[in-house]
Image: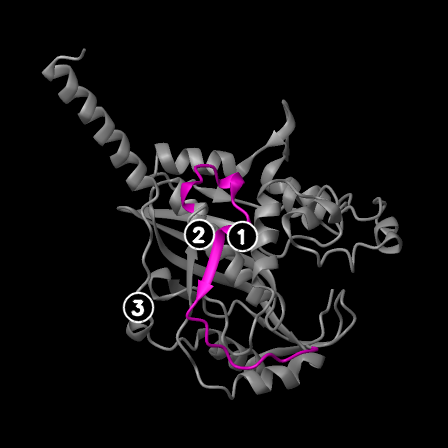
Amino acid sequence: MLGSKQKRNSINLIKNALGDTERRINVFEMKPPKERSPDSQYQDLLRLVLAKGERQEINNQGISCLSYFKPPDLRFDLRNGVPLILERKISFWTKAVAEIFAMINGARTVSEFEKFGCNWWGQWATKEICESLGLPEGDLGAGSYGVAFHNFPTPGLPDGFNQFEALVKGLREKPYLRTHLISPWHPYFASEFGERQVFVAPCHGWLTFYVRGKRLDMCMDQRSADLPIGVPANLIQYSALLLALAQVTELEPGQYIHTFKNAHIYSDQIPAVKKMITREARYLPTMKISDAGLRLESLFDFRSEHFEISDYNPHPAIPGIPVAL
């Protein structure tokens, strides 16, 4: 039998353990929708590129575009909602979230992405295209996101360097550091003038993190941005990543800052863009981590089904917007 002092100590231990659990699964609450202001940042960016973008006739995609180098950043305080665009209905957000978690788990092939719930790479990573790059069918290559994020080629490490594993460790143990960085770029494998071994050279995923008290801010730098098609997927997938990172590091999601280098609209996308910029701005929706997701302690265990969207009131979809690759 335990004495009274031992009982008190045991109860305190249980309380402390429960307290730790409560902190780990503390639900991050966004502001109620009625307290959010309409967000027009994405529309404003579309308008800027339409009005002041330079026409580029020659590029790898073979179709002219309006291109703007280094437009203003998009800044989102996630307490005001997540940037799932409202100018047209986005039904593929779960695939975008699946894609980013496939990437941080090292996915390199079409089949690996499909296991996570992202099935759009197969239409491009065909046998003909892959063979032209010296790759097996369905292989995105040694310079692709999954390799850089999870197995970055590093002398002395047979399996490469896991950048996100190191990031989580750094945020937990030394949040004050200014070296919380992620890069998707392997110059030798991704460059046109190296030994190019990549199906699509990484366009996004340069990440910098900053801890302010208990809030975690993230800046995502995108070197090449297809504004009507690619950017909507990138906005929501990196928002989900920030939510997951904040949970596993016991921080609160802060600002998501999206920085662009080359932002562009292809000529055959212009009619759809002109329609989007005429639509009224609306408040951003809510994203939360599901009950099952709230108990995850490893970033690598997250999947798209661990995220839920609500308060989403978009304008009607605009089907058939062309994709340039």
| In the displayed structure image, the side of residue 58 where residue 74 appears, left or right | left
Q: Residues within 10 Å of mark 3 (few under 14, many from 20)?
A: few
Q: Residue at x 43, y 41 (%)?
A: 180
**Whether residue 184 can be seen here:** no
Instruction: Judge whether 5 appears above or below 34 on screen.
Output: above
Q: In which quarter of the view is residue 203 placed? A: bottom right
Q: Which residues are magenta?
A: 294-320
**Residue at 65% across, 83% down:** 270
Q: Quadrant of the C terminus?
A: bottom right
Q: Are marks 2 and 1 in contact (CB under 8 Å)?
A: yes
Instruction: Assign a secondary structure to mark 3.
Output: loop
Badge number at residue 32: 3
Residue 202 appears in the figure: yes
Q: Position of residue 152 (x, y in %)?
A: 62, 36
Residue 290 has which mark? 2
> Image quarter for residue 2?
top left
Task: Assign a secondary structure to mark 2.
Answer: loop
Mark before the other along the chain sequence, 2 or 1? 2
Residue 208 is one of the magenta-drawn residues: no
Q: Residues within 10 Å of mark 1 (few under 14, many from 20)?
A: some
Task: Please name the amino acid that badge 2 sits on.
Answer: Ser
**Which dot, 2 or 3, sits closer to the camera?**
2
**Left or right of 270 on screen, residue 208:** left
Residue type for callout 3: Pro
Q: In the rendered structure, which disc, 3 or 1, sits on the residue that comes first in sequence?
A: 3
Q: Secondary structure at mark 1?
A: helix
